[in-house]
Image (cartoon, rainbow, N blue to C red):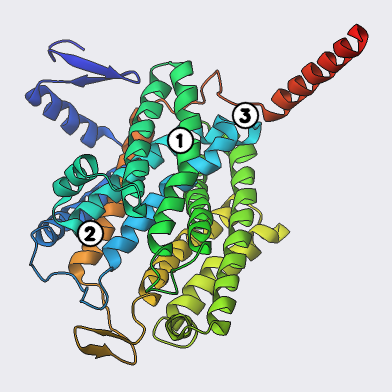
């Protein structure tokens, strides 16, 4: 292009660096893009625009704009943080089958999972920053005053490292640095297990909250992460196939069937763990654990739990991925949509069930149940967070080269085992010949 001055070329697109030229190019692009895309981006920008004042209201400490109380101290913002953080891990877990282990049917997930993971983790950090009010103090405290015995400190360490690794992974992916990319993908796959497990441990070590306490909470967090990330990939790859975007052929032939299989595995694992949690709550001798379980089964959370979490979030998706008539791209899309909504509601009921049981805080007894209702500020922030991820991914889909890489990164575990066995047998044979 002539006359635009300094510019940056990104995936074949020339981006002017001078403000006036950049605005002119952006205006031209907005006018010339398809009508449907214009409406979609406009809708997302409206949601983000509504979330900005909500975030500004939530940031100053002391402003009573959220629904939390001394009894229910963790509300919708914590739920949103947990949801986006574990979704990041689930994306990497699902994609690692192709990027790390080299399984062919999972290789189409490579670039799209990395972009989505980076967007989700950035969004999670933004939400927790609003909930903490003083995020800079948290960062400085974690660095200057480390606390290795605290799961929350380790959560910050793992997710901070995770963000850096994702940035390197995305950079190496688009700049042709295969060795760095291999290291980043392998490290991200390890952190995809360590990070949500540590996040689960933040809840699991709280002895005063029996519903959260125990070793199964981190396990459920990892499995929920796997289900949420896989469901998000199912939604994205349906859109890729439906709109005939880059890689649509392999999305239909490889990615969507592979995601359907992973969805089935994730749904079964989460169903088993939730059933175990309910049975443990019913037979436990701790009143707080029993009360939290009753809150889910017959209490104020029963509607969300039975209708959304169990019915729409687990039972219906399992049927959709199991029945031959619905094992289609459209059936997979519906199963993924219901599953990801179910994971969000599950995190919501999980966080609340551990807090709304009858307790005494500062001399005030919350009986029979403590009350919590999300405010418009909290809802606006979560809606804006979803819109931010959707907008970021939409722009990436339009302006980045999301074709599969020619050289895939993988760790062929079976080949490694076979080579080691051959070396061992050869050494034993040589030793026998010597004797």
Q: Which mark is residue 381?
A: 2
Residue 48 visible to the viewer:
yes
Percent of width and height locating residue 44: 26, 51
Q: Which mark is residue 188?
A: 1
Q: Between residues 159 and 149, which one lies in front from this camera angle?
A: 149
Percent of width and height locating residue 131: 20, 59
Q: Which residue is mark 3?
A: 102
Secondary structure of the residue carrying numbered label 1: helix
The residue at 42%/68% (across/down) is: 345
Secondary structure of the residue carrying numbered label 3: loop
Q: Nearer the viewer, mark 1 or mark 3?
A: 1
Q: Which mark is residue 418?
A: none
Q: Residue furthest top?
A: 434
Q: Residue furthest bottom?
A: 368
- Around disc 3, counting alpha carbons within 10 Å, would you say few (fewer than 14), some (14 to 19), or many (20 or more)? some
Q: Nearer the viewer, mark 1 or mark 2?
A: 1
Q: Earlier in the sequence, mark 1 or mark 3?
A: 3
| Quarter holding residue 418 | top right
Q: CA distance from mark 1 to mark 3?
A: 15 Å
For residue 320, above or below residue 211: above
Percent of width and height locating residue 42: 23, 48
Q: Earlier in the sequence, mark 1 or mark 2?
A: 1
Q: CA distance from mark 1 to mark 2?
A: 28 Å
Tag count = 3
Percent of width and height locating residue 354: 39, 74
Residue 236 visible to the viewer:
no
The residue at 27%/43% (across/down) is: 38
Asked if the residues shown at circle 1 and circle 3 are in contact, with their CB atoms under 8 angstroms apart, the answer is: no
């Amino acid at each position: 292009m002539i006359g635009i001055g300094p510019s940056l070329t990104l995936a074949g697109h020339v981006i002017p660096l001078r403000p006036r030229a950049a605005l002119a190019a952006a205006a031209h692009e907005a006018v010339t893009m398809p009508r449907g895309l214009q409406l979609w981006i406009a809708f997302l920008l409206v949601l983000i625009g509504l979330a900005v004042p909500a975030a500004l209201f939530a940031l100053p400490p002391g402003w009573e704009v959220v629904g939390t109380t001394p009894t229910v101290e963790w509300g919708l913002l914590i739920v949103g943080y947990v949801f986006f953080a574990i979704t990041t891990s689930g994306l990497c877990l699902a994609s690692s089958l192709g990027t790390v282990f080299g399984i062919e049917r999972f290789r189409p997930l490579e670039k799209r999972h990395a972009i989505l993971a980076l967007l989700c983790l950035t969004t999670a950090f933004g939400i927790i920053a609003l909930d903490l009010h003083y995020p800079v103090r948290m960062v400085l405290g974690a660095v200057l005053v480390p606390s290795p015995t605290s799961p929350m400190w380790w959560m910050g360490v793992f997710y901070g490292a995770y963000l850096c690794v994702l940035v390197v992974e995305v950079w190496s992916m688009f700049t042709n640095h295969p060795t760095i990319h291999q290291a980043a993908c392998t490290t991200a796959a390890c952190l995809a297990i360590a990070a949500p497990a540590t996040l689960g441990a933040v809840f699991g070590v709280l002895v005063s909250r029996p519903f959260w306490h125990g070793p199964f909470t981190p396990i459920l967090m990892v499995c929920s992460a796997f289900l949420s990330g896989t469901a998000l990939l199912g939604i994205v790859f349906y859109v890729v196939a439906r709109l005939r975007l880059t890689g649509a052929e392999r999305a239909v032939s490889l990615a969507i069937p592979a995601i359907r299989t992973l969805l089935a595995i994730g749904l079964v694992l989460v169903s088993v763990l939730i059933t175990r949690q309910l049975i443990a709550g019913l037979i436990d001798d701790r009143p707080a654990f029993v009360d939290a379980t009753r809150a889910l089964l017959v209490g104020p959370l029963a509607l969300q739990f039975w209708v959304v979490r169990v019915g729409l979030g687990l039972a219906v998706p399992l049927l959709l991925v199991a029945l031959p008539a619905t094992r289609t791209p459209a059936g997979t899309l519906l199963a993924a949509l219901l599953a990801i909504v179910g994971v969000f509601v599950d995190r919501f009921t999980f966080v609340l069930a551990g807090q709304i049981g009858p307790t005494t805080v500062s001399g005030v007894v919350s009986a029979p149940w403590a009350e919590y209702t999300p405010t418009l500020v909290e809802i606006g922030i979560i809606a804006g967070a979803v819109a931010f991820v959707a907008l970021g991914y939409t722009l990436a889909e339009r302006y980045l080269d999301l074709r599969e890489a020619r050289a895939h990164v993988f760790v062929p575990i079976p080949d490694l085992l076979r080579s080691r066995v051959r070396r061992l047998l050869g050494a034993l044979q040589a030793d026998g010949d010597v004797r």
